[in-house]
Amino acid sequence: MSGPKHHRYHASVTWDAGGAGTTSYKAYSRDHAIAAPGKPEIAASSDPAFRGDGARYNPEDLLVASLSSCHMLWYLHLCAVNGVVVTHYRDEAEGIMREDADGSGRFERVTLRPRVTIASGDREKARALHEQAHCNCFVANSVNFPVDVEPVIEAAG
């Protein structure tokens, strides 16, 4: 049996002062760009609570989205190899982050709430595959806070 495979991922984050720079906490823009080779750029900023632009993605949004996306991709794979035909998937994921008095913080929990429509296959199997998807999710296996999954399975109709 061979050992583990290693995969590398690359991203760049670019910020430009475009003005006074970091002369004070209120002086600089939090707007920045996230890119990866061969992929579209993501307009990002900090959360408005931290003087960011609410129209751009912030790191906290992206962490919650990453957990949701990883879970969905594993789930769809497992359904495909287990005879469950999924026709629609939507997750309304929510993360709770605690900010401490000193400005530091951490995520305390993320809850995934996938609503899945299946055209064929066993509904209980479809529900159970969420547990396996959660166990397989690379991102969920990498965080140090609970990730809960509260699926709803609906039959296409």
Image: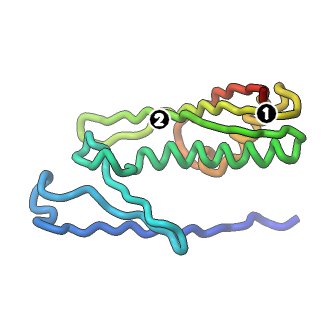
Residue 137: x, y in percent? 67, 47
Which quarter of the image is occupied by the N terminus? bottom right
Q: Where is 130 relative to 138, above or below?
A: above
Image coordinates for residue 127, horizontal then vertical, percent: 77, 29
Secondary structure category for the residue under label 1: strand
Look at 55% across and 33% down and name the residue there: 92
The residue to which callout 1 is attached is 118
Name the kind of residue labelled 1 in the image. Answer: Ile
Q: Quadrant of residue 126?
A: top right
Taking the image as shown, residue 58 lies to the left or right of residue 154, namely left
Q: Which residue is mark 2?
A: 95
Residue at point 25%, 44% (across, down): 50
Q: CA distance from mark 2 to mark 1?
A: 27 Å
The answer to whether residue 157 is above or below residue 133 is above
Q: Is residue 137 left or right of residue 54?
A: right
Q: Earlier in the sequence, mark 2 or mark 1?
A: 2
Residue at x-position 85% and y-position 38%: 84
Give the percent coordinates (x, y) of residue 99. Answer: 32, 36
- Residue at 78 percent of width and 29 percent of height: 156
Q: In the image, is 4 to the left or to the right of 35? A: right
User: Which image quadrant: the C terminus?
Assistant: top right
- Dot 2 surroundings within 10 Å: few (below 14), some, or many (20 or more)? some
